[in-house]
Amino acid sequence: SLGSATTPHSVTNLVNGQWTTPAKSLIIPNPMDKDAPPVCTVPDTQPEELTPFIESMNRIPKSGVHNPLKNVERYLQFGEISRKAGAALSDPTIAEFFIQTIQKTVPKSHAQAAGEVKVTADFLNNFGGDNIRFLARSFGVPGDHYGQFSNGHRWPYGPVAIIAPFNFPLEIPVLQLMGALFMGNKPVLKPAEKC
């Protein structure tokens, strides 16, 4: 359990499919008990360590990783990922782990933390299966004379950045991260390190 081991859990960075340990880390104290061991350590990524992140983002075209005309099978793949993640987060044991983790990093009551976990699980469950594909549905607009019409698609931006606030450490990062991934973007996530 976080905040109970004498050696705190060490959070690392994920870039290019590899977990990397930064040169510096920040220690997150247990806000519920100042005498307890720290909850964890989180990366304090320095400017000179940003190159792999920037290079990874630069490799993604403006058309994204997938879109309505390219790699369309990824919509269903992310639907399956979302279904499995939502089912896992709906499991009472796993939900309770995240509730307690939220409480150890943000001053929230059990009910408030449970609400955040439930909203996150509901979001993931909602997009399970084939629902992600419908986010990218096309639209048609009639023209101003006979036979003219316009079709459009929702299109990814390509590389995107997400900077998450401290007060919803699970809900906002997951919803924003998954939304970006669902639509074919390549996100870099910068969660709040000072909870």
Image: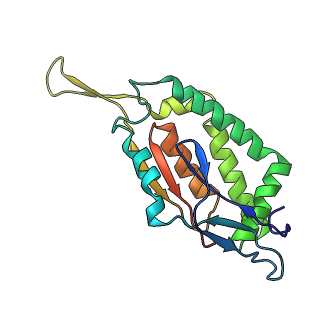
* Residue 191 seen anywhere in this rendered image of the structure: yes
Q: Is residue 145 left or right of residue 46?
A: left
* Residue 157 seen anywhere in this rendered image of the structure: no
Q: Is residue 4 left or right of residue 83?
A: right
Q: Quadrant of residue 153?
A: top left
Residue at 43% x, 29% y: name it: 137
- Identity of the residue furthest to the bottom in this view: 34
Residue at 57% x, 26% y: name it: 76
Residue 135, position in %: x, y? 48, 35
- 147 lies above or below 25: above
- 157 lies above or below 170: above
Q: Nearer the viewer, residue 114 or 32?
A: 32
Q: Quadrant of residue 192?
A: bottom right
Q: Nearer the viewer, residue 44 or 192?
A: 44
Residue at 39% x, 40% y: name it: 59
Residue at 79% x, 82% y: name it: 34
Q: Is residue 195 left or right of residue 118?
A: left
Residue 123, position in %: x, y? 63, 45
Residue 49, position in %: x, y? 48, 60
Q: Quadrant of the N terminus?
A: bottom right
